[in-house]
């Protein structure tokens, strides 16, 4: 989960209220959580928000403006180079989206920088 209070990844039991983002990755490279960067991303201010695609940045701003403290984004909340984490998270995908208080869908663009 991404903390919008201090822009870092946090391990948390399902918070009472959070937003989730569904978006088009497209062909361009998207910043991802991998084993080599997860420790940095869990530090306060550790998320390099300025390097995120526009769809993710826009969703983070919207969620924060609506009063959410957390947002779930697949490229950041799933360790992308861990087959084990991917399998575990993919099995929970229906739960993640159905329990979100808000799901932001950015599907009109052909890539993650479309916003």
Image (spheres, rainbow, N blue to C red):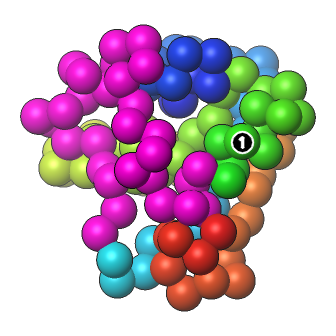
* Residue range corresponding to the magenta coloring: 29-57
Q: Nearer the viewer, residue 90 or 69?
A: 69
User: Does the stretch in magenta take in 44?
Assistant: yes
Position of the C terminus, as image quadrant, is bottom right
Q: Quadrant of residue 17?
A: top right
- Position of 108 relative to 56 (above/below): below
Q: What residue is shown at x 57% (from left), y 54% (from top)?
A: 56
List the single residue furthest toward the front: 50
Q: Is residue 100 visible?
A: no
Residue corresponding to mark 1: 61
Q: Is residue 16 left or right of residue 83?
A: right
- Position of 1 relative to 99 (above/below): above
Residue 50 percent across, percent down from the top left: 45, 45
Q: Quadrant of residue 82?
A: top left
- Position of 11 relative to 54 (above/below): above
Q: Nearer the viewer, residue 20 or 54?
A: 54
Q: Quadrant of residue 29?
A: bottom left
Q: What residue is shown at x 34% (from left), y 14% (from top)?
A: 43
Q: Is residue 21 left or right of residue 33?
A: right
User: Does the stretch in magenta take in 43?
Assistant: yes
Q: What residue is shown at x 77% (from left), y 19% (from top)?
A: 16
Residue 99 percent across, percent down from the top left: 74, 38
- Predominant SS of the magenta segment: loop
Q: What residue is shown at x 11% (from left), y 34% (from top)?
A: 36
Residue 4 percent across, percent down from the top left: 63, 25
């Amino acid at each position: 989960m991404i903390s919008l209070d201090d822009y870092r990844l946090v391990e948390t039991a399902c918070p009472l209220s959070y937003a989730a983002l569904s978006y088009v990755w497209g062909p361009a490279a998207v910043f991802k959580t991998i084993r080599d960067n997860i420790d940095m991303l869990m530090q306060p201010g550790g998320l390099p928000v300025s390097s995120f695609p526009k769809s993710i940045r826009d969703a983070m701003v919207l969620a924060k403006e609506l009063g959410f403290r957390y947002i779930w984004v697949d490229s950041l909340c799933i360790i992308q180079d861990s087959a084990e984490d991917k399998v575990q998270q993919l099995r929970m995908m229906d739960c993640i989206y159905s329990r979100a208080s808000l799901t932001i869908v950015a599907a009109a663009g052909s890539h993650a920088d479309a916003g």
